[in-house]
Amino acid sequence: MSKRIFGAGVFTPTQLADTANLTTGLAMNITATAATNRVAVSEIYMGGQATASNVQIMQWARNSTVGITPTTLVAPNSDGPADGLTQAVTSAALGFVAATTPPQRSVLVTAARLHLTFNAFGGIVRWVAPPGGEWFITGISVNVSESSLSAYTGSGGGAMGAHIVYEQV
């Protein structure tokens, strides 16, 4: 397979508790879409675009409720192969920012989360997995088949851009 880049050119995530649905345009989600899919996330990058100092308490976390009927991405969002010669994949993993029924972050304390806090006033944060240490999204089971990048309770709500590098393996 080949690496893909799921990007959101600009969005302003609003703080959400774990029990809230990740509403349209406020989170970046990647779903496996098929029982046999395995997705390896190797990089998450966020860059602040806010006009004043604003703390973003961002989390990359597993979803307990998956998004139903994800909506097609529109600019400035994108999800495409890093290699222009990539072949089409049957039941490809999918990056989305909106769905008819939105996803929800898992409330389980045993579910993995990456805490990626930064200042949205020009700050950046980049998580890169070491070889073999990728974040895996697998199949279509609760708490492992979809993950999201979203703002957690206490976040300031500043504008930002982000990308996620992943590969269906």
Image: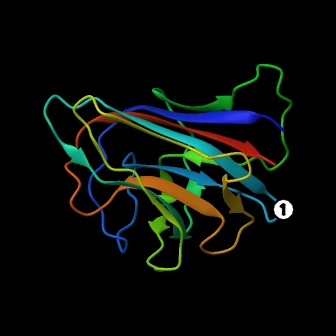
User: Mark 1 sits on what residue?
Assistant: 36
**Residue that appears at 27% across and 36% down:** 159
In front of the other: 46 or 22: 46
**Residue that appears at 77% across and 19% down:** 84
Q: Is residue 15 above or below residue 73?
A: below
Judged left or right of residue 150, residue 120 is left
Judged left or right of residue 114, residue 133 is right
Residue farthest left in this picture: 52
- Badge count: 1
Q: Is residue 40 above or below residue 52?
A: below
Is residue 102 at least partly visible in the picture?
A: no
The location of residue 22, given as percent across then percent down, is 40, 59
Residue farthest front in this picture: 130
SS assignment at label 1? loop
- Quarter location, residue 124: top left
Q: Residue flagged by tag 1: what amino acid is it?
A: Thr
Judged left or right of residue 128, residue 120 is left
The location of residue 91, given as percent across then percent down, is 80, 50
In front of the other: 162 or 132: 132
